Amino acid sequence: MAWWIWVGIGLTLVLGELLVPSGFFVLLVGIACIATGGTVAAGFGNPAWLPWLVCGSFIALLFAAVRRPLMQIFGFDTPSAYKEMVNEEIVLSSDIAPGATGQGELRGTVWNVRNLGQTVLRAGQRCKVLRIDGLTVETK
């Protein structure tokens, strides 16, 4: 595929992200397509499968290195329902050593709990939710 096709697809995807936000998925794929167009223009377009491999590699790299910081910068890192749970109390189901992960119950659901403190947290103890990272509650 010609370099300008890659760039055209990339620009279309970037514009698509601006029109319909997708959590930066479409934006990052668009940027990867533009970068792939640049590598094809630089002479790395043969064999025919190479640009596809390059594009896939760019996509993986961008998702691994850029998506999470972008989500945090623009405030999309934690679903709003989770933000409401910050400062609530979670009841621990197991003892949790400092820096370790155990389990606890919050709003009737079992969560992974990471102990950020310097002391052991005991089963049955109530702890304040400091932050939620994915499906892990952080407390101390």
Image (cartoon, grey):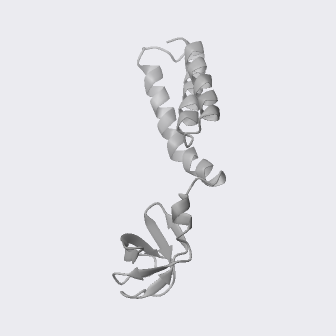
How far across and down, in percent of the image, does residue 107 sit? 42, 73
Foreground residue, 80 or 136? 80
Quadrant of residue 30 within the rendered picture? top right
42 shown above or below 67: above
How far across and down, in percent of the image, does residue 99 sit? 45, 76
State the count of labels. Answer: 0
How far across and down, in percent of the image, does residue 75 sit? 63, 55
How far across and down, in percent of the image, does residue 66 sit? 58, 45
Foreground residue, 58 or 47? 58
94 shown above or below 22: below
Q: Is residue 69 left or right of residue 94?
A: right
Q: Is residue 98 left or right of residue 39?
A: left
Quadrant of residue 36 within the rendered picture? top right
Q: Residue at x 56, y 14 (%)?
A: 5
Q: Residue at x 59, y 52 (%)?
A: 76
Q: Residue at x 51, y 40 (%)?
A: 61
Q: Is residue 117 left or right of residue 121?
A: right
**Which residue is situated farthest in the top direction here?**
2
56 shown above or below 62: above
Foreground residue, 117 or 40? 117
